[in-house]
Image: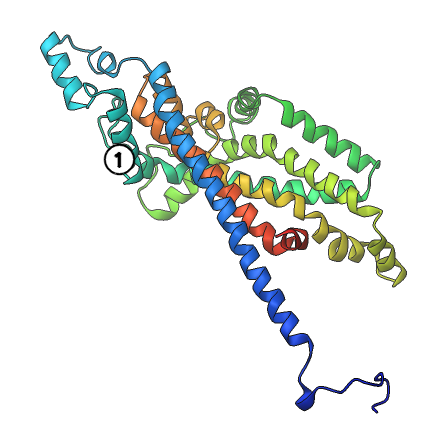
Amino acid sequence: MTDGMPSGTTEPADGASTEAPSAGRSERRGSSGFGRYLLKHVGGAAVSLLLVLFSSFFIFRLIAGDPIDQLTKERPVTPEQREAMRAELGLDKPLWAQFVDYITGTLSGDLGSSFQFRRPIFDLIVERLPATLLLSGTGMVLAVLLGFWIGTRSGWRQGSRFDKGHVATGLLLYSAPTFWLGMIVILVFARYLGLFPVNGMRSPDTPPEFWPQAVDIGYHLVLPVLTYTAVVYAGYLMIMRSSLLDEIGSDYLTTARAKGLRDDEVRTKHAVPNALLPTVTLVFLALGGVVNGSIVTETVFSWPGLGSLFVQSIFYPDRPVLQALFVLFSSSTILAVLGAEILYWFIDPRIRRSG
């Protein structure tokens, strides 16, 4: 009888472990659980995308008016010409047939042509998407970094002057209308101080070489990014602060302090990693918002991105562009949420256990 082994038991031969079968079963359960979890959320995202396609088709037919009126408002046409244009655009078909054409065209990448610009919508999106990604992407990165940094220190120093001052400032900027804050930024930094250009993305007299163009774009980017970041960062600040406050009283932090770890080490190595979980959805939604851009910021600063294109299309109105951008904006948000749900499986053990 081996020391420490109860009588009636035998040691596994050749070092074989009795844990292996249960580990294999656990791995298979986890794999099948992830499959069900993934199928559930992918199915939900697919249903949401179909609802977006359905709603975009009917909503903009209610608010955009008759496309033929928009196409002929600058020149008179005969009734026969109107009917010919209607047939060319497929508007003479029954509504259900137009809906089928719209769904099949959108799913195949054919977004149609713009009434206002007389160009394929896909080309317009490709042309303006880089400007939106540059503005929103830069602003989002700065807002996330600033919000997380301030939120971590505010939550760790709850009730301090640092906490009260930054929370008050963040909430004030967060509640300020974007167009109002943008106008203030223009008045202060462009009109009074003359430090930055008022609008646009490039100056017409900039040399065509790469570096002069890059510097000029960066120069025009400062005020829109400043406005975007100022409005958005408070959301990340408050979420991170609230998450950290939930962790401060936990036993594992007391244990970490009892081991002699410095306060900064307790915060950065233990509290912050656990507090980051609730912010995952917010960050992924921000990634979806990079495509959406900031419609108001782009409009205030005449930034040539998708947001300003959306506003121009509302005023025209340009139904095909509105439909395409609505689908693009909504799809980016849906896919961002799906990405967050998938990531949860890997970083939150409670979801794996429930799956």
Can residue 219 be seen in the rendering of this structure? no
Secondary structure of the residue carrying tag 1 is helix
Count of all numbered marks drawn on residues in the image: 1
Give percent across and percent down for residue 304.
38, 31
Above-or-below relation of 24 to 107: below
In the image: residue 57, left or right of residue 4: left
Give percent across and percent down for residue 227.
55, 30
Hey, which residue is sitting farthest front in the picture?
8
User: In the rendered view, how is the structure colored?
Assistant: rainbow
The residue that appears at 32% across and 39% down in the rendered structure is 126
Give percent across and percent down for residue 294.
48, 30
Give percent across and percent down for residue 230.
60, 32
Residue 155, by quadrant, is top right
Hey, which residue is sitting farthest right in the picture?
258
Q: Nearer the viewer, residue 326 or 5?
A: 5
The residue that appears at 62% across and 65% down in the rendered structure is 26
Q: Nearer the viewer, residue 195 or 97?
A: 97
Q: Nearer the viewer, residue 65 or 107?
A: 107
In the image: residue 321, left or right of residue 42: left
Above-or-below relation of 91 to 38: above
Can residue 252 be seen in the rendering of this structure? yes
In the image: residue 51, left or right of residue 266: left
Mark 1 lies on residue: 105
In the image: residue 154, left or right of residue 25: right
Q: Nearer the viewer, residue 170 or 27?
A: 27
The residue that appears at 70% across and 36% down in the rendered structure is 238
The residue that appears at 53% across and 21% down in the rendered structure is 179
